[in-house]
Amino acid sequence: MSGPKCYRYTVDPAWLEAERHRRELEQCQQAIAQTRVAWATLPRVLADLQQRYPAETLTLDLLPPAPPADQTLDAVQQYRDALNRHLTQTRADLHRLSERAAANYTAKTLLAELSQDTPATLRTAAEVLQTRLDLLPADNRQTEWQRLLQRLNQTDQASLPAALVELRDAFLSATGARQAEALAAELRQQIQRLNQTYRAAIQQQLEQEQQVAARHYTQQVISETLAELGYGVETGFATLFVEGGVAHIQQPDWGDYYVRLRVKPDAGDLNLNVVRVSEDRTAPSNEQARCDREMEEHWCAAHRELLHRLEQRGIASQPLRAHAPGELAVQCVRPDAVQHARRAQVRRTGGLLRQREL
């Protein structure tokens, strides 16, 4: 039975899983590359810290973990996570070094201020401590901001949202410890919200990429299968299973007959029906109706072979609607409805089909 038919086609989940695996591996490798770029900034941070506090001995192992020899997805994911953990720990160690150096510097300055050998006018310990503590919180807030910034996703780090910039500036310029702590809490909440939005967007992007990948795979497989079976296709077929629409296929000896494919990629629907190119809009004669039916019967076996080959390459087709040959009249389409219609030398397809059977 191969009158007009409608199928719901789906791509084998095993192939989609393989494609997802490939994408995740690529994303892991990109994340590792970004993290290693962040690692490269740490020596400069340590050098700046040493320059600010030359009397301090500041040493820290800044070598990142070596990449794994095995490049499987599991191994690469584990390395990505280990690299991120190591980076976070090293940044925390840098923060502690900074705090220790600042505290030592403050203590030494205090002792120098209180020393009887100092020619400058002596101040009370409370005055000296207040002077140094007025400077220290700003350094601490800058360090805290850098620590919070590392929690932010890479996309928002690259281009800080205006609201976050405003909140950061308020935090860094806060005049009191209580105000600074309140702003720091608000910064943490804002970063958490941005990360949640980022993760939702990434998930949506992955789903869209999976759908697009399935469409491109379907287009590729069907194009290759039709070529293997000797079908010619019109130019509109190139993106049929990606963007949807209508296209026509034809064997070289089909004369005025074509098979029209109508595709809805969003739903995964594929409609197939035989059409005949003709300017004549009158009811077909008995002879013409017989030729139309014979063409539909021929297409019956041909389309089963097409579906079988697609299934072998992971594209399954579930029938939704089917009509027997001759049950519905073959639709006539004008010549301009078919792009670059191939005009075969044999005009009477019915006669050609009978010759095949002999």
Image (cartoon, helix red, strand yellow):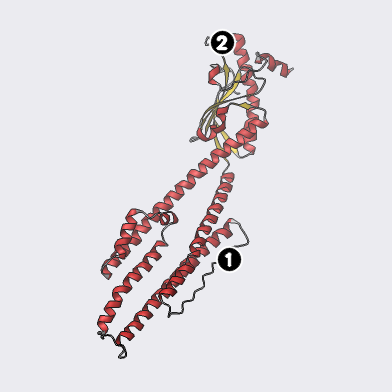
Q: Which residue is mark 2?
A: 284
Tell me what residue is drawn at x 64 percent, y 33 percent.
225
Which numbered disc, 2 or 1, marks the residue closer to the eye? 1
Which residue sits at x=37%, y=58%? Answer: 191
Q: Is residue 269 above or below residue 30?
A: above
Q: Is residue 328 visible?
A: no
- The image position of residue 194, as x and y in percent, is 38, 55
Q: Is residue 286 left or right of residue 353?
A: left
Amino acid, disc 2: Pro
Farthest residue, direction front = 119
- How many numbered marks does the figure carry? 2
Q: Which residue is mark 1?
A: 66
Q: Secondary structure at mark 1?
A: loop
Residue 241 appears left or right of 115:
right
Q: Which quadrant would the C terminus be assigned to in this image?
A: top right
Observer-nearest residue: 208 or 114?
114
Out of 16 and 48, give the one closest to the viewer.
48
Q: Is residue 228 left or right of residue 98?
A: right
Relative to 39, residue 256 above or below: above
Front residue of 355 and 300:
355
- Left/right placement of residue 294 relative to residue 35 reads right
Callout 2: helix, strand or loop? loop
Q: Position of residue 42 (x, y in %)?
A: 47, 67
Give the residue at the far right of this rendering: 358
Crowdedness near tag 2: few (<14), some (14–19) or many (≥20) residues, C-alpha within 10 Å: some
